[in-house]
Each structure stands twice: as C-alpha cells, then as structure tokens.
Image (cartoon, rainbow, N blue to C red):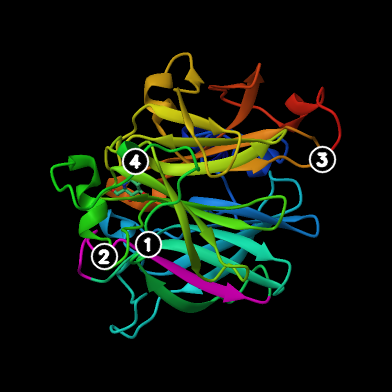
C-alpha cells in the first residue's frame, strides 16, 4: 500500500516536471509569450491571427479557431471569442461567427477565414467583423474581404458579404504627387502596377488584414493586395460595412503582410511582416503623419536575439493597454502549421525612443511595466 502511495506521489511530481510551464492565465498576472495560455476552462486559447475590441471595460479577443493537424489552418469551426477584464484571464465566449454547412456559402466549412478583426460602430451600434476570406477549394486565389455584424460583442455574428474591394477605383493621391508616381494602367511595362491593373475592374485582392478606427470615428481596412506585393489602406463607409473607394497603396512591390496599425500622439504607426508563408521573417514598421500617407518605411522594430525572425512570430494586432496613455502591446502569432491548434501567442510591450519603435523579447512580463506612463 505504502509503495503504491509512494509511486503515485512520484508520478504526480514527475507529471508536474513534464507539464507545460504555468500559463499566463493560471498565474493571472503575467504574460508568458510562447507558452500555453489557458482560458477559464483550462484550454489553450484558440484565437489565432486575432484582434481585440474593448467595450464597456471588457476586452474581447477574436481569432481563428484552429483544429489539430494541417487541416486546422482551414476554417472548420469559425471565429472564436474570449473576454477579459485584465488581459491576463480569458473567459471562453464560444464561437462568434460559425462557418456554414451549406457548401454554397461564401463561408462554407473548410474555407480559409483568417485574421478576423472586430470594431464597434457608435452610429449603428453594431459590432462589425472583417476578415480575410478564401472560398472553399480555391486555395488562396479568391483573396476577398468578408464582413459580418452582431448586436453584442460576443455575437453571434451574421455573415453579410464578401468581395474584392475598390473595383474600378484608382488610388487617392496627395495634391502634389507627380504623374510619374501614380499608377498607370496604360503602361503595362510598369511591372509593379501589373497586378493592380489586372484587378482594376474586378476589385483588388484582399488578404492579410486589419481594421483601424480613428479618433473621428472613421474606419480603415488595411490589407495585403496585388498578390501580396503591395499594402492597401482603404476607407470604410460610415456604417463600416463597405469601402468608399478612397484608398492608397503603401510600400509598393515590397510584399508586406500581417499589418497592425495604431496611433500615438497624432502619429500613425504600422507594424507588419514580410511574406514567407507560415515561417517567421523580420518585422517591419512604418509611420505617417496622415492616415493617407506618405507612409515612411522605418525598418525592423525588433531588437536583440531572435529579432531577425520577429522572435518566431508574425504580427497580428497592436492593443492599447488599459488605463495608460501610450502603452501599447504588440500581438503576434507563432504559427504551428503542421498542428495548427498548437499555435502560440507572443505579446510584447512596445517601447518608444524618440518616436522610434522598439520591441524586445521577454519570457514573462506584465502591465506594471507601463506604470511610469501617465493615465489615459
Ligand atoms: C501568412 C499570413 O500572414 C497568414 O495569415 C496565412 O495567410 C499564411 N501566410 C498562409 O501561408
């Protein structure tokens, strides 16, 4: 009997040694980038390529629900939602947008539905979710933007439509822009404009994306377009359900993915990545005095070991941290393409040095890091 007890006790301690380190959610007061982050049910949070919207003091995290294996990179379930008051402890709020069993639906089960972002429209009082959509069985060729709405943050969201934005529209240019810098579809030899001109009538490709709401309530959809060669930043209609046709092209021909945009002291900042599938590459950042540019390329914001590969991750969102002015959290995904559900979350504090961004790796950190900043 004693021997059995001793065996059980040693097995217990062994299992403790072998188990994953304590998650951010169990310790409830720290972020532990790259570890398992458990929700209120003890399950690894399943919200990849995600974004966060705050509503009445609660944060809602939306992301791709992935399943096991490579197939898990396709949308077998939908968009998962979690809620939190403190950003450490997350409650599972279930599936906010479900894929459809109707194979004819744009969001049929097995389609590719990536990088969902939810914003709140104060005028219509609706929560609006945009996402990158690839139609079932068509690989990454559809390159559409999809939109869904809900009355409550947690949903359920109703799918509205999907399409390629800005069909038949030319980009917006500041008054002084020389003609030579404008897209010219009458000059097919101009290579960097080739994909833009090809898609001019049918609408521009829209893959990796985010949505940003400015202080004046205007919303913008920023997405990898033109076969991922060029970013587009496009104004949304006042109900946030469509594109107005006003847009700019950013970092033309340079293959930027994974855009995440935020604003600090009247300056717009954007962090993105290069384009290497699921494999990590160096992050890149941009800044602009006006949302319609010019956007200046500023290099890699990451510093220290692992900075050449964004510490193994890829940007997805930048979150304004609670309570403090100018406290921002860089959110990235560490993809696990062979077993999609095991993807991890890398959240790191953004530091500013004379308006230059700096992101350093940290195994463990918490919001007290922002204590020196003034209150919002
Ligand atoms: C990188 C993108 O950022 C992801 O969202 C996903 O589309 C993968 N590429 C697919 O390879």
Measured from the top left, where is residue 120 in percent x and y? 67, 64
Disc marking residue 169:
1
Q: Is residue 148 covered in magenta? A: yes
* Tag in front: 3 or 2: 2
Q: Which residues lie in the magenta part?
A: 137-151
Residue 348: where, in percent of width, then height? 58, 31
Q: Position of residue 273 (x, y in %)?
A: 39, 35
Please tell me which of labels 1 and 2 falls first in the chain: 2
Q: Is residue 10 shown left or right of residue 326?
A: left
Residue at 48 percent across and 37 percent down: it is 176
Question: What residue appears at the point 46 percent right and 53 percent down from the top-left corner?
Answer: 247
Q: Quadrant of the C terminus?
A: top right
Tell whether label 4 touches label 3 (CB within 8 Å): no
In the rendered structure, which disc, 1 or 3, sits on the residue that comes first in sequence? 1
- Disc 2 marks which residue? 142
SS label for mark 4: helix
Q: Are marks 2 and 4 in contact (CB under 8 Å)?
A: no
């Amino acid at each position: 009997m004693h021997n059995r007890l001793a065996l059980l006790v040693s097995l217990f301690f062994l299992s403790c040694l072998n188990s994953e380190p304590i998650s951010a959610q169990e310790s409830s007061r720290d972020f532990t980038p790259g570890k398992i982050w458990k929700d209120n049910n003890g399950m690894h949070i399943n919200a990849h390529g995600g974004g966060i919207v705050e509503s009445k003091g609660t944060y809602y995290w939306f992301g791709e629900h992935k399943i096991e294996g490579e197939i898990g990179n396709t949308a077998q379930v939908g968009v998962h939602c979690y809620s939190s008051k403190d950003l450490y402890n997350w409650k599972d709020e279930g599936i906010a947008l479900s894929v459809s069993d109707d194979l004819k639906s744009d969001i049929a089960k097995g389609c590719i539905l990536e990088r969902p972002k939810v914003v709140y429209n104060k005028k219509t009082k609706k929560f609006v979710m945009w996402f990158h959509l690839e139609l079932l069985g068509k690989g990454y060729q559809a390159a559409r933007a999809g939109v869904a709405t809900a009355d409550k943050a947690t949903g359920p969201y109703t799918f509205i439509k999907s399409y390629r934005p800005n069909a038949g529209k030319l980009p917006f240019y500041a008054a002084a822009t020389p003609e030579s810098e404008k897209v010219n579809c009458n000059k097919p030899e101009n290579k960097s404009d080739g994909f833009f001109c090809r898609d001019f009538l049918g609408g521009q490709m829209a893959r990796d994306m985010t949505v940003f709401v400015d202080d004046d309530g205007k919303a913008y959809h920023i997405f990898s377009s033109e076969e991922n060669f060029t970013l587009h930043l496009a104004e949304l209609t006042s109900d946030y359900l469509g594109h107005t046709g006003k847009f700019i092209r950013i970092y033309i021909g340079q293959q930027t993915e994974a855009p995440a945009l935020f604003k600090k002291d009247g300056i717009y900042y954007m962090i993105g990545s290069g384009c290497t599938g699921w494999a990590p590459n160096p992050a890149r950042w941009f800044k602009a005095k006006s949302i319609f540019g010019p956007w200046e390329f500023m290099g890699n914001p990451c510093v220290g070991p692992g900075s050449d590969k964004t510490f193994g991750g890829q940007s997805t969102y930048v979150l304004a941290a609670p309570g403090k002015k100018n406290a921002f959290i860089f959110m990235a995904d560490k993809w696990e393409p062979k077993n999609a559900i095991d993807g991890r979350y890398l959240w790191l504090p953004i530091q500013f040095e004379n308006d230059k961004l700096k992101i350093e790796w940290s195994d463990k950190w918490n919001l007290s890091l922002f204590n020196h900043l003034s209150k919002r």
